[in-house]
Structure formats: structure tokens, C-alpha cells
Amino acid sequence: MKKTLRLILGDQLNYQHSWFEKKEKHVIYVLMELRQETDYVAHHIQKVVAFFEAMEAFAKHLKKEGHEVVYWKLDKKENRKSIVENLNFLIKENKIEHFEYQLPDEYRLDEQLKEFCQNLKISSDALDSEHFMSTRFELRDFFEGKKTYLMESFYRSMRRKYDLMMEGDKPLTGKWNYDKENRKKLPKDHVPIEPFVFEKDVSKTHQRILDAEIKTIGNIIPTNFIWPNNRKESLQLLDFFIKKCLPLFGTYQDAMTPHYWSLYHSRISFSMNVKMLSPLEVVKTAIAHWEKNQSEISIAQIEGFVRQIIGWREYMRGVYWAKMPDFAEMNFLNHDKKLPDYFWTGKTKMHCVRHSVQQSLDYAYAHHIQRLMVTGNFALLAGISPDELDEWYLGIYIDAIEWVEITNTRGMSQFADGGIVGTKPYVSSANYVDKMSHYCKTCFYNKKEKTGERACPFNSFYWHFYDRHRDKLEKNPRIGMAYRLWNKMDKDKRDGILEQANKYLDDLENL
């Protein structure tokens, strides 16, 4: 057998991969902490710590299972900071005759490793990561010839493919989607369940990052680290969600409050995105629990959860591989403004933005509506460059890996793709934020006012957005109502709103 080196990337911690079924003496596995991965954007300190902790735990697991493993920390003398340089060193040092890697989920790494193998003088092979429920190009082929990729259609195909919550070819109860039942505001006096967190000491890993002078963002308490770093902990978090949170997950999945950071969300996206949990096992485990507890858990709760994973998550990955690398350059609305400093500090008078950003800085986490309808909505209305926002989202969230981040940012959130992911821009005035949250009542700005000293910026920005992009959006059948309302407004009122918006846009840093 040829002496083989197998590369495991930081988001390929699949404890169940077929690579590990047999202990092979001729195989060496390598995991590396790399400056090329810590430095391409400024990542949240909790994100970098979580990756390194999970990678090291995985390496220890493989060693315990009898595999030969090389784990290079940041401070190892031989660590040359890049994948290619390190692999060349290891291949030469260990007299490697064959190289293997799992297909990366990021385009840049896919290209880098393909080029590396083309220049190798030894044989090489790329294998599947054995994680996702759809293949790289399954969505591309599913929507061949279509301009818009309707997620609901793909979601239904995945339900059928894996026979999840189905009766023959039809969904249970005859209904595919319960989204309309999952949009409730958190009642004023409602106290959600206390989140399940891990309280670990990650001081050594944190110090290693500090010593390396890696530029990071966000906050951390290294003696009280809350995120899972191995499969056992990931399964514990999943179990807590299914047994304690699922009964109210769907009902309040879009709700926002400044009083609680976790609500009923699963917070397993980091575990899934680094592959400690597989999407199929997650949904099957959740469905099995629901089937035994249907008197306590309505179908709307489980369907909403399943749709997020086998619908949205698989869909976003499919869009990524169908449209990269061009997707990373899309800017349909030609937005070019700089991201305001308060996205890095949380210091703004807008309560919804302040809290969503501060929570992100404190926990490396915010749920999907905080991302889409607060920070994303604000950035879209204000005309922020998608490049700026991409970098922020990719850095600040613990679960952000490009294949899932960029499609949500440029597609769903910023409409920079011109309508591939979303059929219309997801924008709103203060009305939606107030409908789904407890932010507005204690905000410096008045949610009801469009003009004036304390008028909510979202209100004038909303109409300014539609007015300035009339040529690109007016013919969109899903936006007609907004333009009809705008056209009916008195001209002086429209002028006042646009003047207010321009005043705010000229002073974006001080909102």
C-alpha cells in the first residue's frame, strides 16, 4: 500500500466518515491551524477558538481510535501558515506516495487544492465529505434553464427523496409548509427556557491566538466558553433542543427581544457546518421525537425545523456551487456605501441594530431574522456595499462559512444577485421590526414617524430605497403594492421623506 497523507480541513470534522472505519498503518491524517484561514477576514474570537478547539478534539479522537494523526498548532515551528506550504513539507518529510483530501465546501479552497494536486509529483485523489443530503450540482441541475431558484420546489424534492414526513408522494396532512403559523411575536411576559450552554475553560487556545497576534472581532470569556467542540457535546445540544425547545421553536422562530439571546433556537449550526452532526441524522432524530410526542409538539414546529435544514441549508449550498465564482461579484443594485462603525461597536441609537450587533459581538450568534430583517434590512435600505457586508457576516458569526454566508448575504439579504435566491428584496420599515420584536418601545427613534428629528431611519430609508431603484424594481410583480402606495402619496410628503432619508444617509455614522 502507498504511504498516504489525508488532509482534514477545519470544517470537515465528520466523526462518521468512511475514512475512519478502518485503521490503516500506511495512512497519516493531518489537521492544521492556519494563518491563511484566520486572516482572510477578521473573524470573531469565539469563532476562531471554536474551530481550533473542535479540530484539536477531533484529532485526539482519531488518535484514541488508533489512527496516525498530525496536528499542527499555530505556534508550531514548522507551520508555514498556508495549506500548500505545509502539505509540501509533510509530503517530503514523511516520504508520502499518495495524497487525498475531502472536497472542500468553499470555492477558494477547492481551487487551491485542485491546483496543488495538479502540481504534485505523486498521485492524488479527492473524495466526498459524506455530509450533505444533496450533491454539489443537484440544485443546478434541478433548476436547469430557470432564472429564479424557488427554494420551496427544491425543499419538496428533498422531502420526497428522503421520504421525510410523507405519505407516499404527498406530505403528511396534505400540506407542505406551515410558515404562516410560525411568525408570532414573543408575548410581553413570556420567559423562554434557559439556554443550554457549555461552561468550558479555553484559555490555552485563546492565549495561543493572542500570542499569534491574529486580528479578531467580538468578545469572549475564555473561562466560560459556551459552544460545543466535539460530537458528544453537539449531540447533547441537539437533544436539549428537541426535548426542551422544539415544542415552541416554530411559533417564535422569527421573534426578537432584547431580553433573551437564544429563545427556542437549536444553535447547532456550528456543529453542523463543521460536520460534527449530519443534516440527515438531525432531522431524523427530531422527526422521531415529534412522532412520539405529537400531543405536545404541533406539526408546524417540526416542519419549520426540517425546512430550515433540508430546504434552506441544502438549497443555499446548491446555489453556491451553481453560481460561484460569479456570485461573489454580484451587485445588482450597485450599492457602494461603507459599513458604519457601529456594526463593529454596537454604538448606535437604533435599538434593534444596537442589540442585534451587540449580541453578535458577545455571542458570535444572532438568529436568522435578526440577521435578515435588522442588520441585513438596514444595510440594504442604506445602500451598503455587499462586499462590506459579506466580510462582516463571514467574520462575526460562529457558523459562517462562505458557502452558506455569501448566498444568504448577497442573495436573500441584499438582493445583489438580482433575484436568483429571493423573488423580491427583503426590506421593511419600522412596522415589521415592531411587529416581531420588543425593540421599538424603548428606542430613541419614533417607530411611527417618517420625518422629523427622531423619525425612525427605517421608515424614510424604506421609501428612499424603492424610489431610487424604481427602474430595476417597479416591474417586479411582488413589489407593485409599494409603488402604488408611493405614487398615491402627496408630492410634498414624498419630498419630505426623501429629504429625511438623504439627511440620515449623509450622516450614517451618527444614527
Image: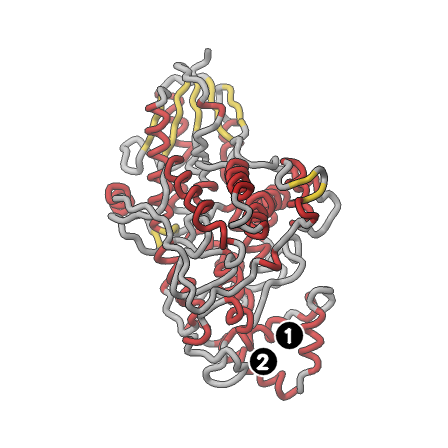
Residue that badge 1 annotates:
467
The residue lying toward the viewer, choosing from 497 and 116, is 497
Q: Few, some or many C-alpha atoms within 10 Å of disc 2 (few <14, some 14-19, many ≥20)?
A: many
Pointers 1 and 2 in contact (C-beta within 8 Å): yes
Q: Which residue in the protein does label 2 denote? A: 498
**Of the pair 215 and 318, the residue shown nearer to us:** 318
When the figure is inspected, residue 117 is found, relative to residue 247, above or below; the finding is above
Q: Earlier in the sequence, mark 1 or mark 2?
A: 1
**Taking the image as drawn, is residue 216 in sight?**
yes
Q: How is the image coloured?
A: secondary structure
Q: Amino acid at mark 1?
A: Asp
Q: Quadrant of residue 501?
A: bottom right
- Secondary element type, mark 2: helix
Q: Secondary structure at mark 1?
A: helix
Q: Is residue 33 above or below residue 254?
A: above
At x 61%, y 56%, the residue is 179
Q: Residue 257, percent across and down?
A: 43, 65
Point out residue 81 in the picture as x, y percentages from the top left corner. 36, 37
Q: Amino acid at mark 2?
A: Leu
Badge 1 density bin: few <14, some 14–19, many ≥20, Cα 10 Å: some
